[in-house]
Amino acid sequence: MPSRDEIFEKVKGALVEALGVDEDEVSPTATMVGDLGAESIDFLDIVFRLEKAFGIKIQRGELFPEDVLSSTEFVTNGKVNEAGLNELKTRMPFIDLTKFEANPSVQNFPNTLTVEDMVRYVATKLAA
Amino acid sequence: MRWFWIDRFNEFVRGKSATAVKNVSLAEEHLHDHFPGAALMPNSLIVEGMAQTAGLLVAEAIDYNRRVVLAKVAAAEFHFDAVPGDTIVFKAEVLDLKPTGSLTKVRSTVGDRLQGEAELFFAHLEPGEGVPKLFEPDELLRWLDQMHIYDVGRDETGQPLVRPDW
């Protein structure tokens, strides 16, 4: 099992290649969408690169839960409801939702996922 | 009307690699203004030729059952301009192929000189994912025939590709 720093370096490499950003922009606290400019198609590319770099299998929706964010069951008046937040916590235990919970508007979600979340996600997959 | 930026395939190995050619001719109208007296093929259209070579390669590998859309062009580099009279050879390789997308590498050469190279990432979309139907089956088959895919194409075992019965 690689260390956290080793995982971070490989994740950084994947993000630099997929997003065309500079290495120093990929800090642990940088958000994938807001700071690094990732678009939905980039997540598909990032999934390819992470799978290859770490030899893991990433299922659709694991990194970007589009189905939760567009579900009438989990979203009420443009905000993720309690059931939705519980679903996100179950599905994405690697992500820190503290800030998002303060204003769980669907449009805020893309700015929630950080580089460190990605590192935690990969660590979870490697440990499984 | 469709834009065809490859003239034919010379090699086509299912899910693995393909070679296509594009003859650049001063008869192509877009070259008359690009540029007057000094015609050269825009590299953006060379990327389109790369995408058609690699896109058909991955679309065939998934039996044309999803809509293959060029999603990203990465690490594109061009070393010199292609001009009328040149034959551009596109060599595409599949680096990774999944139901949802594929990563390919394509090189363009003129003679023995490397003209350009790029990594092309394709999304494979299903109906309802925001992309209209790209081809009618008979129209696609006409294009594949025109590209000589079933003349030169081979499957993974080296057997000739079977022309679909659409």
Image (spheres, coloured by chain):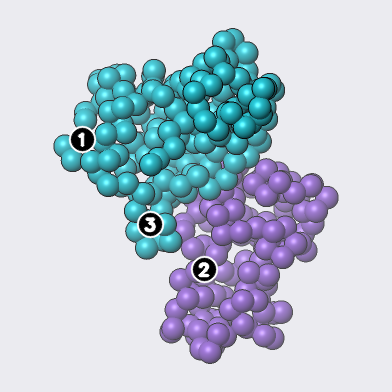
Q: Amino acid at mark 2?
A: Pro
- For discs 2 and 3, the disc positioned in front in the rendered view: 3
Q: Amino acid at mark 1?
A: Pro
The residue lying at 56 percent from left, 59 percent from top is: A40
Quarter of the image for the N terminus of chain B: give it: top left
Q: Which residue is mark 3?
A: B132
Label 1, secondary structure: give it.
loop
- For discs 1 and 3, the disc positioned in front in the rendered view: 3
Chain containing the residue with disc 3: B
Distance (Cα) linking label 2 and label 1? 37 Å
| Residue B114 lies in quadrant | top right
Left or right for B154, reference B43: left
From this viewpoint, which residue is outermost toward the top?
Answer: B112
The residue lying at 26 percent from left, 36 percent from top is: B141
| Residue B132 lies in quadrant | bottom left
How busy is the neighbourhood of tag 2: few (under 14 within 10 Å), some, or many (20 plus)? some
Label 3, secondary structure: give it.
loop
Q: Which residue is mark 2?
A: A65
Percent from the top left, x then y, of residue A35?
Answer: 75, 62
Q: Amino acid at mark 3?
A: Pro
Q: Colour of chain A?
A: purple
Q: Are marks 2 and 3 on the same chain?
A: no
Label 2, secondary structure: give it.
loop
Q: Is residue B153 above or below residue A110?
A: above
Q: Nearer the viewer, residue B44 or A91?
A: B44
Percent from the top left, x then y, of residue A16?
Answer: 71, 46
Q: Are marks 2 and 1 on the same chain?
A: no
Q: Which residue is mark 1?
A: B164
Q: Earlier in the sequence, mark 1 or mark 3?
A: 3
Distance (Cα) linking label 2 and label 3? 24 Å
